[in-house]
Amino acid sequence: MEWRRSAFDWNQARAFLATAEEGSLSAAARALGLTQPTLSRQVASLENTLGVTLFERTARALLLTQAGTQLLEHFQSMGEAANRISIAATGQSEAVTGHVAIACTNGMATFYLPEILRKLQETAPDLQIEIIASNEMSDLRRREADIAIRHARPQDENLFAKRLRDTTAHLFASSEYLDAVGRPSHSSDIAKLQFVGCEYPERLLGMMASRGLNLTVANFNYSTASVTMSLELIRKGLGIGILPVDVGAAYPELMNPYPDFEPLKIESWLVAHRELKTNLRIRLVFDLLAEHLGTK
């Protein structure tokens, strides 16, 4: 390793990372327990060491420059590595124990969490993990959950959020169903078929129309708020439904009935109360979820 090339102060790197994630010097200073002038000097020193400008300072905001944006991902990786080192070191002298509640949809709980939780058990076998599988949004400030996986960025400044990789969803139907009704070749064909919808199918109509499918509530013979139930209905040949692409692709009897349908992009956020910065067990679970559900 070229040690001379990496000779910058970690405190300066941490100051940059906190400022980028918090959005302002004052907020970053509070998060790190520093004064704003001290934090500002650390960021300026890092810019001087690296020979680049990381922030554009305007009257109203502190904006990342192109160089700052490009370097942010690398500094985030450093921050996550530092947290893992701290957790690993602490684990040498004390076990990570206690209860952590994770709130997410039943689809996320069923299709994505089990493998991650298996890895968590290898790291911290004494943790008690509660999975709150519901489409209702848990109130983290009231401690209804410690960590949540949501499909919208939270607006509450007391919550910490990390963007995860987007989910892509598409239409799926069983080959049995398509053999029975015929494979559609045009949007007018698919509009004659049965669909499995969400809890309120009328909410899907506008989205479907924007993608060339003019449906009515009458198309939705079945509806459910449960993604796992929707999957089973689709697999049993009861209609066409929308599923995450990687979920639908896991079942060989399912196929895309209409490739011209524009895929849906669903954003996801990992959210926790800011206590995660000081709570070892919550931080450990948060970081593991972020590692496995984060951007590719």
Image: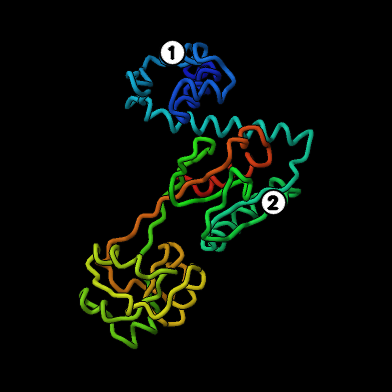
Q: Which residue: 49% across, 41% down?
A: 162
Q: Is residue 96 visible?
A: yes
Compared with residue 156, is residue 179 higher up or lower down, i.e. above or below? below
Three-letter amino acid code of the residue under disc 1 = Ala
Residue 62 locus on image (x, y percent): 37, 23
Residue 226 locus on image (x, y percent): 50, 68
Q: How is the image coloured?
A: rainbow
Count of numbered circles on the image: 2
Tag 2 residue: 121
Q: Which residue: 34% across, 88% down?
A: 180
Q: Name the quadrant containing residue 60.
A: top left
In this rendering, would 68 be left or right of 116? left
Q: Earlier in the sequence, mark 2 or mark 1?
A: 1
Compared with residue 156, is residue 172 higher up or lower down, i.e. above or below? below
Label 2–label 1 contact, CB within 8 A: no
Q: Nearer the viewer, residue 75 or 136?
A: 136
Residue 51 locus on image (x, y percent): 38, 14
Q: Residue 44 shows which numbered tag?
A: 1
Three-letter amino acid code of the residue under disc 2 = Gln
